[in-house]
Image (spheres, rainbow, N blue to C red):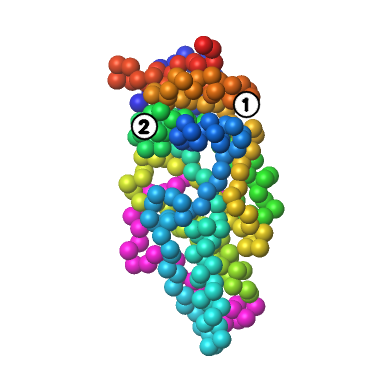
Amino acid sequence: MKLQYNINDDYIKFIASADALFHFTRKETALEHILFNKTLRMGEFSGTNDPQEYKPKLTDAVGWGWEEHHDKKVDEATLLIDQLLREKSKFISLCQNDIVDGNLRSHGALKSRMWAQYGDNHKGVCIVVSKSKLINQLKMQLESNYQVGYGDVRYEEPDLNRNIPCLDIDGSELDSLSASEIAISFVNQHVEELFFTKQPDYKDEMEFRYVAIPTSLESTSAPIYIDLLQCVHSIILGDAFPKVYKPTILNLAHELSIPIKKLHWEHHAYILLSWDKS
């Protein structure tokens, strides 16, 4: 599904580009939190709707040179790995355009199922941000306490033989490293497998994901709020966004100095309307 537009329309060119990312949310969340506070919240994987992410992780451990006293540290490390994966690490996922070999195959902002599932049945809001600016903002904001990873989510069938990769560690490492150091090192070694793979059922969401892994469990804070002023591009309202909220959202968009648009479904296609004026 595509929008027809003038080649000189800079707004449409941006939302059709590889730099555009789309965060669908309920109108209450957008109005009362995101736009009012001018922040995007990074969440925990334990709060997602995907059991591959929110369920406890069963980490096996193997190695050589273990002594009886190592067992307690191994147990502690595997528990910390689970905490890192589900609670201590923070993330945000946004939808992106489907672009192959420079050609736009589908608009991220025009996914009706995303509007239905995440955008309050088309009554919600889509926050449009710049991928490059968001990457820079996260690095600047988090690099002192977190390792920031980002990239496309891959959609693959899960490995039925094990839940997550196995912790492979020998006795000398158990003697020299703390349980938290072991856990953080393990997670950083397996970032792609642990954070950037999902089941194929989710492939139409076209996720671009940011993950913040703490460099020390003592320095973590929850939650993390991203400064929206540094990366926001515009606001798009759903087809059924209630008009009663128009003055409020126009005022919030004015405070952010960004354009506001509204999708309208007509004759089997979306039309993008301007809502900057009454």
Q: State the residue lying farthest toward the bottom.
A: 68
Please tell me which residue lies in front, 29 or 69: 29
The numbered dot on residue 256 is 1
Quarter of image, res 227: top right
Please tell me which residue lies in front, 45 or 3: 45
| C-alpha span from label 1 to label 2 | 25 Å
Residue 141, how many percent across, how many down? 67, 45
Please state which amino acid type lies under the numbered disc 1.
Leu
Quarter of image, res 221: bottom right
Q: Residue at 54% across / 15% down in the picture?
A: 276
- Does residue 232 appear in this view? yes
Residue 209, how many percent across, how many down? 50, 45
Q: Is residue 19 above or below residue 75?
A: above
The tag earlier along the polypeptide, 1 or 2, is: 2
Please tell me which residue lies in front, 170 or 84: 84
- Does residue 97 appear in this view? no
Q: State the residue lying farthest toward the left.
A: 268
Callout 1: SS: helix
Report the residue marked by disc 2: 121
Mark 2 residue crowding within 10 angstroms, few (<14) / some (14–19) / many (20+) = some
Q: Is residue 116 above or below residue 179?
A: above
Residue 65, how many percent across, how many down? 54, 85
Q: Which residues fall within the magenta stretch?
A: 149-176
For the N terminus, give its image quadrant. Answer: top left
Tell me, yes or no, whether the highlighted magenta stretch contains residue 90: no
Callout 2: SS: loop
Q: In this view, does 89 lie above or below 32?
A: below
Please tell me which residue lies in front, 168 or 25: 25
Residue 139, how many percent across, how many down? 65, 46
Tell me, yes or no, whether the highlighted magenta stretch contains residue 164: yes
Please state which amino acid type lies under the numbered disc 2.
Asn
